[in-house]
Image (spheres, rainbow, N blue to C red):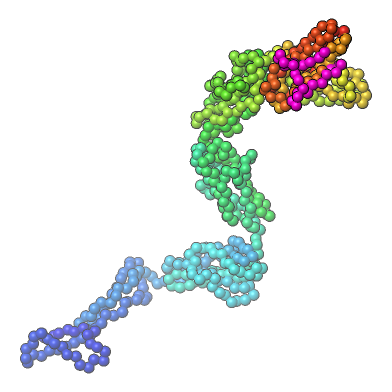
């Protein structure tokens, strides 16, 4: 009978051990032997083979038998013998500052038969050979920036590759490197995914991103023509990139966004075009022509912002100045001109125009002042003194915006000398297509008189701008001296804070200050004496134009005006 007892059951320095057997016979012979312990975990050396991977464990054997197995070894790949890698191929300096140097290199040609697990960077001052390791852990990338250097100092650098067999040979930067700031013009980084045109729907977000570089670090500025970006956009800028974000965009956010980077070495810009799919903006300013007693022709420009879609048509509306509701006069106007008809004569109207595209009707453009369908012409524009001589003054002005619906039959120019109350008419007219020139003959040398220009044709309506002063100025005469008074409707005007009246033997002047719509109406000048009575009326509409009215009379024995 043979009993096997593991050697581990024997205490250290054991001399004697007692074994109890459950059953034994007298006179039997027993032989005892101990098994060996498990060996240590095997480690590979001098590996060769077929590139397969293996795991191993080991068991010890003695006369008593085979002992327990060891722990399993790590996975071992059988292949040809390996060695440390060769040196990196090229090491170059890509950037420097006062306290840092940036390096880049290429992988070694020979990896030593094992995968390269990193790189070690070493440096030394140029006048020493005391190399020291820069990175505490191996660098996986093929670039590295060494920091915390002394400003203006010269350094040497070298790089070594590392694999499982150890550190390989080093490749050194050919020349020493000085820590100084490098100056470089700004550059804008554009990759394959870069888009200069962005199309977004109204209500979505606009996000523009751009990366840049330069030394010193460039200043980055976003701009947009005719817009203050700080009111709508959130701009975030670092030393290497900038983002512009506009939340809940609308048509006004469309346009060209310009990004500019600049430093001491130069500047560079790039333009982003943003299209916002929305309803159109307001059309251009509304102008008008051919005003008659029952119609007006409106003209306008296309909207600056079309909402990212073609304008289908325009909607033209009107309303009386005394009302708030708008009336559509054309809902499908395809041109930028429209004749509005069926207007009430003498009634002021406001007009507005809206553009429509596939996303809906946009904001309207509205006339700021009402226009009266009347026969009264607008005042001439830009009365200028063109030339003067010893005996003449050349004046020039532009034709009125509209003629009130009938051809202008003439211009009346009046002149008075400084300090004089007498207006004198001196007219010689020459007209061209766009401009009318008038020469005042026999002007006195040194004359500093004032000139007032009015029109005369078939109309009898005077319009002035709200908030202006209305001046009713008439030259009068008669023998005996007549009684004179101004009236509005059936009520004679009385002087007050708003109304100023001045009557002399030669003039009757009424001034209504800061006119409003309540001052519109019919004003009548009455002149009477024992020989008779004369009246002259003028209809005033307070709409927004300033007017100075001069009503002239000739002296006769009876009161009269012209």
**Residue 6 seen in render:** yes
Q: Position of residue 383 (x, y in %)?
A: 79, 24
Q: Nearer the viewer, residue 379 or 14?
A: 379
| Residue name at image x 53 percent, y 45 percent | 207
Query: Which of the 4 quarters of the picture holds residue 438?
Result: top right
Q: Is residue 504 magenta?
A: yes
Q: Position of residue 527 (x, y in %)?
A: 81, 12
Q: Is residue 208 magenta?
A: no
Q: Quadrant of the C terminus?
A: top right
Q: Position of residue 169 (x, y in %)?
A: 51, 72
In the image, taking residue 443 as reference, residue 381 lies left or right, namely left
| Residue name at image x 76 percent, y 20 percent | 494
Q: Quadrant of the N terminus?
A: bottom left
Question: Which segment is the magenta one?
Answer: 483-507
Compared with 347, 188 (above or below) is below
| Residue name at image x 26 percent, y 80 percent | 38
Q: Residue furthest left?
A: 26
Q: Nearer the viewer, residue 133 or 274?
A: 274
| Residue name at image x 74 percent, y 16 percent | 492
Query: Which of the 4 quarters of the picture holds residue 174?
Result: bottom right
In the image, taking residue 46 as reference, residue 102 lies left or right, namely right
Q: Position of residue 447 (x, y in %)?
A: 90, 24
């Amino acid at each position: 009978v043979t009993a096997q007892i593991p050697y581990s059951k024997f205490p250290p320095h054991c001399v004697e051990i007692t074994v109890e057997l459950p059953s034994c016979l007298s006179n039997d012979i027993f032989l005892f032997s101990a098994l060996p312990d498990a060996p240590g975990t095997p480690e590979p050396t001098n590996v060769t083979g077929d590139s397969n991977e293996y795991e191993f464990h080991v068991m010890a054997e003695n006369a008593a038998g085979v002992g327990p197995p060891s722990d399993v070894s790590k996975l071992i790949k059988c292949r040809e013998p390996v060695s440390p890698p060769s040196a990196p191929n090229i090491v170059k300096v890509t950037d420097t500052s006062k306290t840092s140097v940036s390096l880049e290199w290429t992988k070694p040609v020979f990896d030593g038969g094992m995968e390269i697990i990193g790189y070690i960077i070493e440096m030394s001052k140029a006048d020493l050979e005391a190399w020291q390791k820069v990175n505490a852990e191996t660098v996986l990338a093929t670039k590295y920036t060494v920091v915390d250097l002394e400003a203006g100092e010269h350094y040497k650098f070298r790089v070594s590759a590392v694999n499982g067999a150890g550190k390989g040979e080093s490749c050194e930067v050919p020349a020493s490197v000085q820590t100084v700031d490098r100056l470089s013009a700004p550059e804008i980084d554009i990759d394959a995914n870069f888009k200069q045109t962005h199309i977004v729907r109204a209500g979505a977000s606009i996000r523009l991103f751009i990366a840049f570089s330069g030394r010193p670090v460039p200043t980055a500025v976003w701009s947009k023509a005719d817009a203050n970006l700080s009111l709508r956009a959130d701009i975030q800028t670092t030393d290497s990139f900038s983002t512009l974000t506009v939340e809940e965009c609308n048509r006004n956010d469309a346009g060209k966004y310009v990004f500019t980077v600049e430093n001491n070495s130069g500047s560079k810009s790039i333009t982003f075009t943003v299209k916002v799919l929305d309803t159109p903006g307001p059309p251009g300013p509304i102008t008008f022509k051919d005003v008659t007693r029952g119609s007006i022709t409106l003209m306008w420009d296309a909207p600056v912002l079309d909402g990212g879609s073609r304008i289908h048509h325009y909607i033209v509306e009107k309303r009386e100045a005394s009302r708030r509701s708008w009336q559509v006069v054309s809902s499908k106007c395809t041109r930028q001109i429209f004749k509005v008809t069926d207007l009430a004569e003498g009634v002021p109207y406001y007009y507005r125009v809206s553009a429509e595209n596939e996303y809906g009707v946009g904001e309207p453009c509205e006339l700021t002042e009402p226009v009266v369908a009347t026969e009264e012409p607008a005042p001439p524009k830009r009365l200028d003194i063109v030339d003067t001589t010893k005996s003449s003054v050349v004046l020039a002005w532009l034709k009125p915006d509209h003629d009130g619906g009938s051809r202008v039959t003439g211009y009346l120019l009046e002149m008075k000398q400084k300090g004089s109350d007498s207006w004198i008419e001196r007219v010689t007219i020459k007209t061209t297509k766009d401009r009318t020139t008038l020469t005042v003959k026999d002007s006195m040398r040194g004359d500093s008189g004032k000139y007032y220009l009015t029109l005369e044709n078939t109309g009898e309506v005077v319009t002035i701008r709200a908030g202006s002063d209305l001046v009713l100025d008439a030259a009068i005469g008669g023998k005996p001296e007549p009684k004179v008074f101004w009236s509005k409707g059936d009520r004679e005007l009385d002087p007050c804070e708003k109304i100023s009246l001045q009557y002399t033997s030669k003039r009757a002047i009424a001034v209504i200050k800061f006119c409003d719509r309540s001052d519109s109406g019919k004003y009548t000048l009455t002149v009477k004496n024992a020989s008779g009575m004369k009246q002259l009326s003028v209809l005033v509409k307070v709409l927004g134009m300033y007017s100075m009215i001069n009503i002239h009379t000739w002296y006769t024995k009876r009161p009269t005006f012209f």
